[in-house]
Image: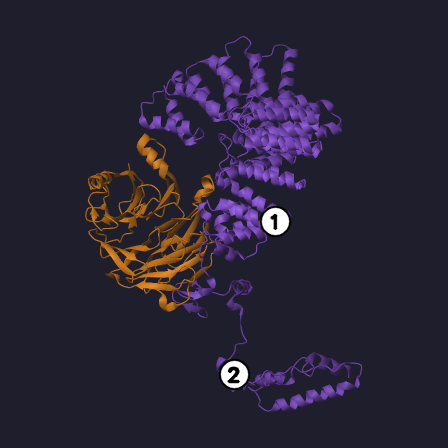
Chain colours: A purple, B orange
Amino acid sequence: MTEERLHIDWGNDKLHRTQKQVEKNPYDLESWSILLREAQNKHISEVRSLYEHLIDIFPSASRYWRIYIEHEMKYRNFEKVEKLFQRCLMKILNIELWKLYLGYVKETKASLPTYKEKMAQAYDFALDKIGMDIHSYSIWNEYVNFLKGVEAVGSYAENQKISAVRKVYQRGINNPMTGMETFWKDYIAFEQAINPIIAEKMSIERSRDYMNARRVAKELEVQIRGINRNAPSVPPNGSPEERKQVELWQKYIAWEKSNPLRTEDTALLTKRVVFALEQCLLCLGHHPDIWYQAAQFLEYSCKILAEKGDVNASKLFSEEAANMFERATSSLLNKNMLLYFAYADYEEGRLKYEKVHQIYQKYLEIQDIDPTLAYIQYMKFARRAEGIKSARAVFKRAREDNRSKYHIFVCAALMEYYCSKDKNIAFRIFELGLKKFGDIPEYITCYIDYLSHLNEDNNTRVLFERVLSSGSLEPEKSVDIWNRFLEFECNIGDLQSIVKVEKRRSEVLSKIKEFEGKETAQLVDRYRFLDLYPCTATELKSIGYTEVINITGAGKNHILQSIINSDGDAPLPIPDYSQMIPYKPKSNPLPGEHPVPGGSFPHPPVAAHLCTLLPPPACFRGPFVNVDLLMDIFNRIQLPDSVPQPTENGCDVKLFDLAKSVHWIVEEGGTVGIKRKKRLGLAMDGSDDEDMPLPPSNDIYRQRQQKRVK
Amino acid sequence: MTKSWISRWKLVKSYKPIFFTSHKGPCYTAVFSHDGKYAATGSADTSVKLLDVEMMVAKRETKETANPCRHTLKEHKQPVTTVAFDFSDTKLVTGSQDGTIKFFDLSKLGRARQRSVCTISDSHVIHSIDYHPSSQYLLVGTSNPVVRLYDVATQTCFASANELEYHSASVNHVAFSCDGKVYASASSDGSIKLWDGVSSRCVATFSEAHGQSSVDCVRISRNFKYLLSCGRDNIIRLWDLAMGQVLIAYEGGSHAKYGLKASFSHNERFVLGANDGSNTAVAWDTRTGEMEQGLVQPSIPGHAAPIREIATSPNVSGFLTATEDKTARYWHYS
């Protein structure tokens, strides 16, 4: 394909460069649009290969299909156009594309004798597929007009025609779309023209459905606002625009799932949701979650239908779900394991084991992939569905495939151990794997794990010795195994063997640069347990332990990782408000504000909020404080040196008197003492009510109450 | 020796103006986004233009008809004096002589992008805005001597606690260092002040940095060791922040009439300034202070009026000049 395209003579260096760019990154939309713009000016035969390549990369991008088809149409290659429509229409439910198709049929088939049938067929087909689209009004309207325009001779044909038109109208007014108000009006007018009485009846009958659909249309408009429905599907790149689009689509799909039409008809609901999902897949075809969601929804509605007893429809949807997986795995995401596995599990759930085998085969046949995980899943499936024999067959196949990695040996061995409870077979598998993957420390670690969990101390020790002395491991890689050995000995061996292993280990380690002169760091390894260390984090750092753990493998431990990372980049220094003053820019501060140069010191936020709730200053009409006198009083107050002790009444009488004196002193100086005596006297008198507790002497309210009681 | 001469010769031939905006009034300011994809210019016609840098280049090279000017934002009532992008390049903030600072959300699509999402009203004419590297705080210089620090989330304003440390005349330019530890301000009182990024205390004052004349521009180098200042005395100076003294003076430009915001080139190898006499941009070697003859080609009909600000792209050899002749020109190395 590529060589073919290189023949295109752009006549411009820049465009050649753009083409190179596209070859390097096939999802570079901007470069594609540059190329496309140029290509549209060329003859179709020159750029056909380019288009083919483009729709190969973006098989669901209606925009590119449209440009291609329009270009072909310009040169009147109608056969090609027809073929292209056949290729894209069913897959791409895009309203613009379908409108193009209808326009094409209308134009080219007009001369044919079977024009009317063809056209009606095309419309029916289109409405069936895309009629649910919110912008489908023009198709509905055209169809009605087309039907109305058909000449009918004789009353039978006339009646036929009327009922055909009525049928389309009645379908249309239940369908949420923009412009449905006009459609409804047209329908009423149509019925009026035939028979006003029936029209009345019809409009009453149908208006509820219409109102419902209209409401949904309004909501739908809100839901799809912001969604770019013509965006070509590109692999996820995590950009904010993409995230936004995904979010919007998910919202729209969730809305459709919530059954906005409030219909009882599960089939209709499913159809609508699937339509929404299909629309979404046109734009987000590279997102596996949408595919999975679509299949899952179909499965769900299949269950609902089965509960309702509609076996046929249920079966249909169940097939649809499988079909959805099939489409996903054979088009854009043909290398996405997640979908393959989900598909396989789905088919397994339907007990179609033959199909599951096919699915795994299909994935494993792809050349440039890592099939290890697929083999493992395949093996697990074979075990649970068909027993250990079948799983062994898969394992045999997997180990003959030279792309697969050591994981399959681990998986197979553990499967034998856990499922068929056979230690020996597992042991043999591990041994077999050791021959092939003797130089991969991770594999050996798995083997050691297995052996040590079996409590076969001697065998484990033998394995350690075998692996470490065979020389198949480079020193850097053997560090891991040495660590395990040391840990193993620490757990079960005596001190001598620990020291022995440690010594041997340090011999190996001394060959590695990072360990030079760090004997203490090695000692740490002897004593650590899980995430516990014999030193603090800073001590570890000073020993140099943090530098070596990347090699010893202990760095996988997240606590140490955090120690290492903490000396990485410091957080950005951020302004500390407590060291600044709040500042409110104002050219001329109001009187009463606390002024600072060029502004004022604002109220704290809570006080500022309170101020907004208070009435405006103009509402305050007094009493005004005579500031001079107040200050004078403040000056005369003699504050005690110590804090006065509270009396048993909870309040100090003297303090109260002090406050009273402040209040009274302005008018008359010496009356206070008398009053006080009076009050105290009153309180004394009140004590003849023995059951009543003595009120605090400054509690005027209770004093008055007692007065009244007297 | 020969080699360096050749490479210099190549540079000499290289900067060419490839795009210019058409404002309706003198263009006061220009800035690039931090990823270098966008640029924004502000003008006396109260508008801000958002430019797509790649499209400016593409337009030149492929004769594309698409307009690189993505949006014209017309929200201010007075000339726009400063524009800034936040560090995630999703917010554009503009300051104007009407005393308002407006925020535009670039992550929105279509028309929503052209409406400001929030406004801060200040009492004085805004001269300069710069973002803290966390994009949470905004440093604002106004015709008032007090440098303001706004919290973007709450829009509350803070200032340095010590009144004695304030400038004594309007603040012309403010700049955060890219580690957020210090910021600098340049004022009409002729001084440059360095402030602590955490406490907002003044840590150094270079008074009479450009003689008696006012200082219009401060820029902190990427390793936050040097500071570039530009004053009305027609000299651009490079300061060592640790020593607090002038290292190099770049002489030979002239920009005394309107003042200039000079800049480092994208790799900080050159200092870009202006010559009002010939209405051209000029360049000096940052290390030696020698003027690079004709690095920016004067023979190409450049500007018809003095340059107000030079903004350099963060990652490619390109810069924008905002000028009195109602245009901002993009000069590209090709």
Q: In which chain is the residue bearing label 1?
A: A
Q: Which residue carries the number 2 mark?
A: A634
Q: Residue at x 33, y 63 (%)?
A: B204
Q: Residue at x 54, y 11 (%)?
A: A115
Image quadrant where one finds the N terminus of chain A: top left
Q: Which mark is residue A126?
A: none
Q: Which residue carries the number 1 mark?
A: A490
Viewer-proximal residue, A387 or A453? A453
Viewer-proximal residue, A295 or A40? A295
Q: Residue at x 58, y 40 (%)?
A: A464
Do tag 1 and tag 2 residues touch (Cβ < 8 Å)?
Answer: no
Determine the secondary structure under disc 1: helix
Q: Is residue A264 above or below residue A647?
A: above
Residue type highlighted by circle 2: Phe
Residue type highlighted by circle 1: Cys
Image quadrant where one finds the C terminus of chain A: bottom right
Viewer-proximal residue, B119 or A375? A375
Is residue A187 something that shows in the picture? no
